[in-house]
Amino acid sequence: MVRIYYHLNQLAGNALSSREIDLKKFDELFEQTEQNLFEFFVAEPVGFFKKLLGQSSAKSQFRFVHLSRDGFPYSTSEGDFYLPVALIFYDIDDANFPSEFYFIAKIEAQLELRKCQAGKDVKWYQIPALHEAVTDSATIQKIEQSFFALRQEVERVYKSKPDPNHEVIESEDHGELDNLEPEQKNAYLKLVDIALQNHSKRVVVIEHIQQLKQTDEEGFFSPLDELIEYLWQENIRLFVNMDWKQEATDLQWHLEYILKDNWQIETQLPDANTEFGLDATVSNDGVFTVYNQALLPHGLTIGQIDTDSDAYIFLVHRVQDTDIVRKHVEKIGYQYL
């Protein structure tokens, strides 16, 4: 998962100056949508028209725009970093950090436009040294057009949503989704008690669980997915959802954060690059086992949740709570691995 890294919460170059992109519009995008990845299909001119318009006009905007909702500092054995809230633009999704990507980062109350040449061999801690200023006018125009297209799409969806201040009387057949069954809700709350017992935002999680809804008939809405997405935006890791091809270093990063934030434990976990090699992903044999072994001396373990997908969803809990965690994971509708 592409993310942006600085060493400090300060501009690396000059603040962005654009008539199309400003801080107010930037913030509105993050407020109006919970979606984190947008893909745009832009037709390319061909033949005579491509020659007429020129190569630079072949693609007027980026294919992918990713909303990174971080905005927090992070300290690890590789050094001190800051992960800003950012919009990330790229055309080819060929690695966790694409071969070429651009981003608009929010640093304090300013925006900064940067570009980065990366690829599959680049590691996350190298990113601060790799991104640089964007000066090419054609690229800046492409960024502005992509930003405008993103705003249009977000506003289209946002405006289609019902006004929360407008009372709508739903028919019995088309009412809103039902609240979770008490047994499911209590199971989620119990998992909070177990895995977030000392977390500073524990009450925030409990309040959100109280209004979770049932899965819809088409199966598009999962309470677990919705909760994970909400907690990610709140920077709370009760559950972590990782794609099978994410780097092992991402798992190390998540676990170090969980230990510090959920359990108030600061420790050095095995270095993923040293243990598994530079190209290792979380799906490589032994990756989860090595990190689980590293947690055991602290009385903790990684509990994986089987959602019948190619993603890894897990939480960290005390070893002594394994049986009760398994019981409550099953009550929310999944198998505990």
Image: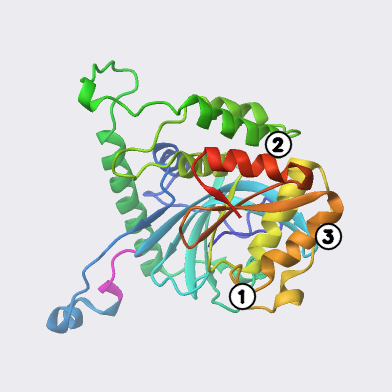
Q: For residue 122, which numbered disc appears in the image?
A: 1
Choose between 70 and 292: the one closer to the eye.
292
Can you tell which of label 3 and label 2 is closer to the viewer? 2
Coordinates of residue 22 in the picture (x, y in percent): 44, 45
User: What residue appears at the point 67 percent right and 78 percent down from the top-left corner?
Assistant: 278
CB within 8 Å, label 1 to label 3: no
Mark 1–mark 2 Cα distance, whole angstroms, equals 37 Å
- The amino acid pointed to by label 2 is Ile
The image's colour scheme reads rainbow
Q: Name the residue under label 3.
A: 268
Element carrying mark 2: helix
Between discs 1 and 3, the one toward the N terminus: 1
- The correct choice, above or below, for 243 with respect to 35 in the image is below
How would you rate the neighbour count of disc 2 (Cα within 10 Å): few for under 14, some for 14-19, many for 20 or more?
some
Which residues, given as a range, are shown in magenta?
Answer: 56-62
Choose between 117 and 159: the one closer to the eye.
159
Q: For residue 130, which numbered disc appears in the image?
A: none
Choose between 148 and 13: the one closer to the eye.
148
- The amino acid pointed to by label 1 is Val
User: What residue appears at the point 42 percent right and 38 percent down from the top-left corner?
Assistant: 28
Element carrying mark 3: loop
